[in-house]
Amino acid sequence: MGIEDKVPAGFLLTTVEYLAGYMRMHSVWPATFGLACCAIEMMAVGTPDYDISRFGMERFSATPRQADLMIVAGRVSQKMAPILRQVYDQMPEPKWVISMGVCASSGGMFNNYAIVQGVDHIVPVDIYLPGCPPRPEMLLHAIIALHEQIQNTPLGVNRVAAARAAEAAAMAATPTHQMKGLLA
Amino acid sequence: MTPTVTSEEEPENLPAPPGTSPEPVVMGARQGMFGASDGGDTSGYGGLVAPVLFPAAAVRPYGGYYDEIADHLERALVGGSASYSQAVERVVVDRGEMTVFVAREHLVAVARALRDDPSLRFDMCTGVSGVHYPHDAGRELHAVYHLLSITNGGRRIRLEVSCPDDDPHIPSVVGVYPAGDWHERETWDMFGIQFDGHPALTRILMPDDWPGHPQRKDYPLGGIPVEYKGATIPPPDQRRNYS
Amino acid sequence: MTNQYVPLMFFAAIGLGFAAFSVFVSPFAGPKRYNRAKSDAYECGIEPSPRALGGKVPVKYYLTAMIFIIFDIESVFLYPFAVAFTKLGVFALVEMVLFIVTVFVAYAYVWRRGGLEWD
């Protein structure tokens, strides 16, 4: 990405990774993408009872230009899909996506012509959060998991190595249909 | 035990005693119970055949304020483009609600009479809905208008207009009830009824280039099979029927 | 004179230096990932309505800018006058009235141009 991606290995790369991750995870501003019922729980997370302000994330930015995190909260219809993609494209890097609720993760109970069966058809998702709707505590857990993911993001040559390793693991993994578990 | 009804107690919602009102019309038959029928049937109700009943045309007196409405409408249509007997195909009074079946050529005249006549004054059109009867040849698509009169004490009436599938045109009531604009767009989007005279008849719920009209009975549900670990579950309309 | 306002000057310098650093270093240190959507105007996710090249903001917003100048900058000047007007005497009063009249001409222009109409 920027200058932090060009630090050569062995030259304080771990410290740079740690600092960049630390600063990024503590300064996330979510973008308002509450579409349906999950938006109510997302609003509840903003209330003092569950308090997303403890992370400094109470400032939901309506404009994608100032947002880091897109929490897709709710079902995405076929008509909404290009709008979702446009808003995602207009966010500057680094950006992350949490798909909140089962409708955003996989289409949920709406397995029909009108609903996109999972926003990972449209945008790359970092954290999938199931629930219909997920409790505000569950959304906070997803945000904490995302924070850990952000903190441990590799940079520079480590990022290239991690991407290669992830691809190799995915190629060698059992396909979902073969994971029969106790059924085999 | 047949209930005996005296002349003092005759609330409008009681079913008429047998013999005084026409029998319901059989519109078709339903096989099995509700639910998906594309997959295998394990419920045991697969052999059940039940008739689909619709209420027949009501006979006078309709009960309540419906007689007034019918009389005022008949008077209001005199001297217009169509008389009451030409415009109104039949009147159905069922479960305390009045439905007036209107011929589609005279829909705008009837709507204008219902809105403008002082004793009718149905000032609100709360919605235009669509219905699809695939087996009713010549009358497949219906448009249903719900009208409400606030000035005359909360009276409600329903207009129903039908059109065949080969010629799905119904005149638009936007000139009489501008609130029906988006409702007619939705009915076009979901059923394919074209409203002649509508200012901008485009799709409203589905994307602009969507093929087909989703709420028709012959439109598929469009689900995808769901992949679990070790198994694939078909979409809801192709699963086995347990109900 | 040297003791009271020197820390304030240091603070101003630090603030200005931080802002200048952020603005001038980020084009070099930051990533460059452009896509078409990022350079488009934001219109709640739909394709933005076509506009003449180089004019991302409609020019009619100059009226809003003028209203801002008239009301905000004028009140910035009126506040110190209001605080100190007893000591300043008639001369300052006449001068202030002339200032308000001058700004009022601009206000009359905006008003007649329709800048106060809620469009």
Image (cartoon, coloured by chain):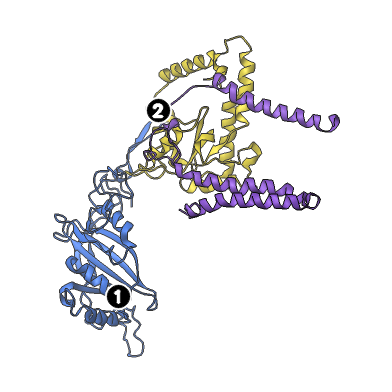
Q: Is residue B154 visible?
A: yes
Vertical order, B176 against A46 (above or below):
below
The chain under label 2 reads A
Q: Which residue is mark 1?
A: B116
Say what secondary structure mark 1 lies in. helix
Q: Hey, what amino acid is under mark 2?
A: Thr
Q: Quadrant of residue B91?
A: bottom left
Name the residue located 51 percent from the left edge and 51 percent from the top edge: C109
Side of A100 where B137 appears, left or right: left
Q: Is residue C44 above or below residue B173?
A: above
Q: Residue A22: x percent and y percent?
A: 63, 26
State the mark number for residue A176. Answer: 2
Give percent across and percent down for residue A144: 60, 33
Q: Are marks 2 and 1 in contact (CB under 8 Å)?
A: no
Q: Colour of chain C?
A: purple
The subunit carrying tag 1 is B
From the image, state whether disc 2 or disc 1 is nearer to you: 1
Q: Colour of chain B?
A: blue
Give the quadrant of the N terminus of chain C. Answer: top right
Toward the bottom, the furthest residue is B7
Which chain does yellow denote in the image? A
Do the residues indicated by labels 2 and 1 lie within the same chain of the protein?
no
